[in-house]
Image (spheres, rainbow, N blue to C red):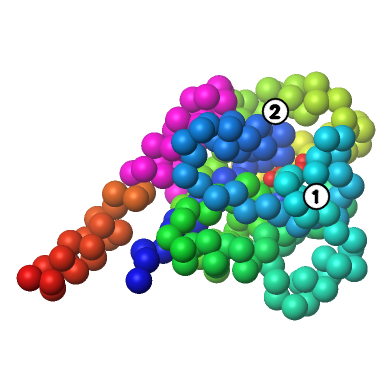
Amino acid sequence: MKERGLLIVLSGPSGVGKGTVRQAIFSQGDTKFEYSISVTTRKPREGERNGVDYFFKTREEFEDMIENKKLLEWAEYVGNYYGTPVDYVEQTLSEGKDVFLEIEVQGALQVREAFPEGLFIFLAPPSLSELQNRIITRGTESEDLIRNRMAAAKEEIEMMDAYDYVVENDDVELACERINAIVLAEHLRRDRVAPRYKKMLEVE
Ligand code: 5GP
């Protein structure tokens, strides 16, 4: 039987750059992680493609997925639903591949419940004021929305306690390096590696 893959959860406050770091990780030619494409009810932004960036659904379709237990976790975030399809995650982990989730913090807490053995990485902003600048310069959100996101971010930072690792996003390349290093180390943990050696002894 194949050894199960690792479930890697990257989360953190709104505007910290989770999406940018995730894209940078997946644009590296040698990425070994499988990205779990989320389901959402928000409208596609320009350039976003269904089945690539997200699976775009109606609220009704999303609520059906909740009801039929098709989601590993889900959250309502700034008026829209976001969720992780459970079948893809289960299937990919059982094929021995590492699955990478990039989700907001309420969802990450639910994954922690379902998969305590997952690897939970909190992406932290260098400072809250920098976070605010980034949200404003993104320019796609109204002031009210920005204020909501800031209030949410303050609460989210206090949630760092629920994670195994904290990676500061002061530089995207550095953040990617740190995440890759964490995953590498996690694969080398004794409790993951030892069973393989023990099996080897059984063959003797
Ligand atoms: P955006 O609308 O900017 O693409 O995403 C908004 C927030 O939703 C981001 O913090 C992103 O990480 C989060 N998100 C994306 N997919 C999921 C998901 O499947 N589950 C949860 N809980 N959050 C998600």
Q: Earlier in the sequence, mark 1 or mark 2?
A: 1
Residue 176 among those drawn in magenta: yes
> Callout 2: few (<14), some (14-19), or many (20+) C-alpha neighbours within 10 Å?
some
**Label of residue 141 in the image:** none
Q: How many marks?
A: 2
Q: Which residue is mark 1?
A: 50
Q: Nearer the viewer, mark 1 or mark 2?
A: 1
Magenta span: 163-185
The image quarter in which residue 57 lies? bottom right
Residue 166 in view: no
Q: Which residue is mark 2?
A: 131
Q: Is residue 137 above or below residue 176?
A: above
> Callout 1: few (<14), some (14-19), or many (20+) C-alpha neighbours within 10 Å?
few
Characterize the magenta stretch by its predominant secondary structure.
helix
Q: Give the farthest residue toward the left.
A: 204
Q: Residue at x 67, y 37 (%)?
A: 19
Q: CA distance from mark 1 to mark 2?
A: 28 Å
